[in-house]
Image (cartoon, grey):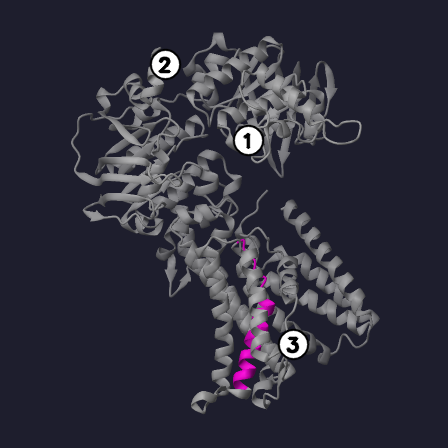
Amino acid sequence: MQLSLESHKPTLARFQSLIALFVLCLGISLMSDKFLTVANFWNVLRQISVNVCISTGMTLVVLTAGIDLSVGSVLALSGAITAGLLRNGIPMPSANLFIGFTLLGSILAGILTGSGLGWFNGWAITRFSLPPFVATLAMLTIARGLTMLWTGGFPITGLGDSFTYLGTGWLIGIPVPVWISGLIVAIATLITNKTRLGRYIYAIGGSESAARLSGVNIERIKMVVYTLAGTLAGVGGLLVTSRLDSAQPNAGISYELDSIAAVVIGGTSLSGGRGSILGTVQGAIIIGVLNNGLVLLNVSPFWQQVVKGFVILLAVIIDQKSSKRE
Amino acid sequence: MLTAENITKRFSGVTALDNVCLEFQAGKVTAVIGENGAGKSTLMKILSGVYSDYEGQIRFKGESVRFSSIRDAQGCGIAIIHQELNLIPYLSITENIFLGRELTTRWGTLDKRNMRERTRELLADLKLDLDPDTLIAELKVGQQQVVEIAKALLEESEVIIMDEPTSAISESEVAVLFRIINDLRQQGKAIVYISHKLDELFTIADRYVVLRDGKSIESGDMDGIDHDTLIRKMVGREITSVRRQGAGRVFDTLFLVENLRLKHPIRLQENQLKNITFQVGRGEIVGLFGLMGAGRTELLETLFGLHPKRSSGLVELDGEVIPLKTPGRSINAGLALVPEDRKRDGLVLDMDVKTNISLTALETIEQAGLLNQAKETTLARKYIADLRIKTPSEKQAAKNLSGGNQQKIVLSKWLATHPKLLMMDEPTRGIDVNAKAEIYKLIGQLASDGMGILVVSSEIPELLAISDRILVMCEGTLTAEMAIEDASEDSILKAAIPKTMSERVNE
């Protein structure tokens, strides 16, 4: 009967997904000797850092009882903007001018593109009281179209070693993307557990009308949350582009689904108000390990999708059972 | 007809029902009374098949039964009508009544004609003059309730359990409901009637059963007992009704409302609030009465900044103008609102007591941009102690507490903002007698500490007991203002009834 807010703290509440992860790892390592190696360990973490970035933003959105379907497209546009600016700058033929961008400038522009699109999502949702599903679905198409326009449909490649360091480099024995996503997770955990913003996010998801009557500025909090989600999708775009040394116009397609899967497997309720960032991280790791394991075991990519779908179902069923027992 | 023998039900360590024995007879209305948390709703859930794991025995017409589901209980002839009605708003009356037991033609398609006919009959029996195709959303709450009853009658239920059936309906609708209950009684049905409104029970019930702390304390005929004795049995001790002292006192003006208007959300030419002007003094308790739809709730909402685009007028608190723009600005100016629907608007039910209390006052527990857990716990414990909130700890989820304790959490969260004017919309709705008395006492205390208080209530005795002054609203206008010593139930009601309606009554 005793169900308190403790459940969004990363204590024992998420224990069963840790067990699931352990069983998963054990199973794969019995079947493949390539799984339990240092190289593969970092490889998996590097691969999931993009999803961790996006899913952190997604968790914030879902906690307010919203959803962001546009993250994959926003990721693509952000990556393309960074790559385009870095490679080509902004040519202005009429004035016979060429505005070059530094590395830092291009990166910032890419991330800010993500923030801008996220802000637009929040604006559409709060200004016109649109359901988040609809507003972000529209953005999914808009941002994808803009990406195509910006790239002309072709990848932008050859971005230079200092840029690819972000996605492929190492720092003190740990891959750079893992540092970046780890930092993001740490900050987001702090925000959700220790700040007013975090508290308001949970309150809005728990009961929007009670939060409003308590003086919470619902519109502002939602704007912040969607802007953060867009920003983090932008960071994800940076990591993807940097790792591939190329901005693909169709990057990030269906990433929103992996992200929602991570959030849900991590125990965050799609109706809002319950869940945690660290739960989502566990969800992302489970998906990452599963992907990796299935590849190592030479499972066909078609079967991989089927298996992944069943794992999502199973995870959520187990989670619901255990939260009822609480 | 229906007897419960030695029913015991435990929830993870807590005993909700302890050896409860009671009996419901055919052709009788049995009132089940008890404070919140006494075990009434658990008992009803067992009788209606929601819980099937309990100790003890239930006999229905002499036979031992154990319902495994609500459908199972319904099939045997036991129907329950919940406080929160279970109807689907955008389906018609017919569709709702036959939901889950549709009649079909021999082709397997819906037999709409037959269902509509049957619905028409049921509605006619209940003297509800409505087209069976009307959508539920278009009905008044009282009418929806009658539809629920019709649903129960369709199953030929022999036991009908009604949980707080009058909590959301007007006086005239109550009269209709009572007439229906009388008819059902004459048809030999056993009616189980749960209500906090004791006066009603004396009108409608034949027998009573008192539950306290999960035990069945006593049962008997309503004829043989009076109001005060009944209350004593419910709470286990005497409750003295406190009358407000010091009539005729003069208060400094604290809160001033002038020419407040609120446009109708759709028909913009009309006003839902028409030139409302009043004031509340420092330390004064002003009671506001109005029938349903008089605009009481709209008035509080407007003052709290919830209708910024439709409202106009001057509102001053302690000499400062309040912009009526957002709840945040109203709160900062020193207003607080305890809303009518505490489960939806007052609390975040999934959150714990502590988090709910601190939600309005997070600035005060912030340190260097982070929330300080220790300060938050101190804040919560202070109010848990001050208001005597019964909870195992400040970490208990709000949804697990009783109505009275939930209301105290809502009060705590507003007291934590140190308001100058506290507005309360139906502060004691659905709360047991004991908690009611505590809340009245608290209101009195807050007023003597200098807070201004504006209480909206649809229970006139309540307003007479706690207010210094009474305002009455009708159709968006203030129709009367009276000092407490001049106020009576008659004069208040007279001012509250719309002209057209009171003329009709006089005919």
In this view, the mark in front (3 or 1): 1
Provide the residue designation for mark 3.
A46
Provide the residue designation for mark 2.
B505
- Left or right side of A202 for B331: left
- Local SS, label 1: helix
Q: Quadrant of the N terminus of chain B?
A: top right
| Residue at (32, 33) in percent of width and height | B455
- Vertical side of B98 occupied by B338: above or below: below
Quarter holding residue A259: bottom right
Q: Could you tell me which chain the residue with mark 3 belongs to?
A: A
**Can residue A191 be seen from the camera position used here?**
no
- Say what amino acid the circle numbered 3 marks: Arg
Residue B230 spot, x, y in % from top left: 46, 16
Q: CA distance from mark 3 to mark 1?
A: 55 Å
Q: Main secondary structure of the magenta part?
A: helix
Provide the residue designation for mark 1.
B136
- Left or right side of B349 for B51: right
